[in-house]
Amino acid sequence: MSAAKKVVEVSAALIFRGGKLLITQRHAHAHLGGLWEFPGGKREAGETCEQCLVREIGEELGVEISVGELVEEIAHDYPEKSVHLKFFRCELLAGEPQPLDCAAVKWIVKSELAAHEFPAADAQLLEKLRAGNWC
C-alpha cells in the first residue's frame, strides 16, 4: 500500500477587465511548466483562502485585488500530489499586472481560451467559462 499523497490547497483568481480574463504562464522549470493558468498559489498555514490570494497576487503580479465570490472548487489528483483548488472572482484595485513570479501575463477573450494549454485540474472550470458569460 502506498503512502497518502500530499494535498496542496490552492487559491486562484478570475480577474476580468473590459471583457477579458487575466491568465499567467508557469515558469518552464516549475511543475507543469509552460502551461497557462489563473494566477494564485498555495495557501500557507494560518491563512484563509482569501488572504492567500491577496498575498499571492501581490507577489506574482505586483497588484492589489479584492476577493469576491467563490466560483468553482475542484479536487484533482496528479501522479505526485493532489490539489484542492478554489477559484474566486476578483477585482483589480491597484496596479497593472506584471510577470514578477511567472513567465508571462496575458489578457484574453473567451474565444482565445482554447488556444492556451492549461493544467488538467482546470478542465472543469474551463468548461464553465466557455459555456457562461464573461463578467
Image (tube, helix red, strand yellow):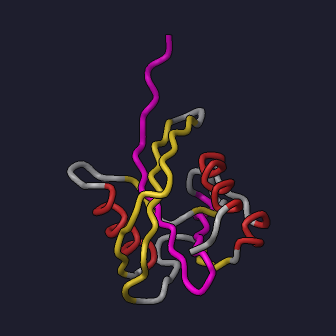
- The residue located at (63%, 69%) in the rendering is 133
Image location (x, y in percent) of residue 98: 50, 83
Residue nearest the viewer, comparing 27 with 66: 66
Position above or below: 99 against 70:
below
Image quadrant where residue 62 sits: bottom left
Query: Does residue 111 appear in this view?
Result: yes
Image quadrant where residue 27 sits: bottom right
- The residue located at (44%, 52%) in the rendering is 86
Image location (x, y in percent) of residue 80: 54, 34
Q: In the image, is residue 99 part of the stretch drawn in magenta?
A: no
Position above or below: 10 against 55:
above
Image location (x, y in percent) of residue 11: 42, 56
Image quadrant where residue 58 sits: bottom left
Residue pushed farthest top? Answer: 1
Image location (x, y in percent) of residue 15: 50, 74
State which region is magenta.
1-29
Residue pushed farthest left? Answer: 46
103 horizontally vs 94: left or right = right
Q: In the image, is residue 3 part of the stretch drawn in magenta?
A: yes
- The residue located at (50%, 10%) in the rendering is 1
Q: Quadrant of the C terminus?
A: bottom right
Residue nearest the viewer, comparing 62 with 72: 72
Position above or below: 118 against 94:
above
Residue pushed farthest bottom? Answer: 95
Circle count: 0
- The residue located at (49%, 16%) in the rendering is 2
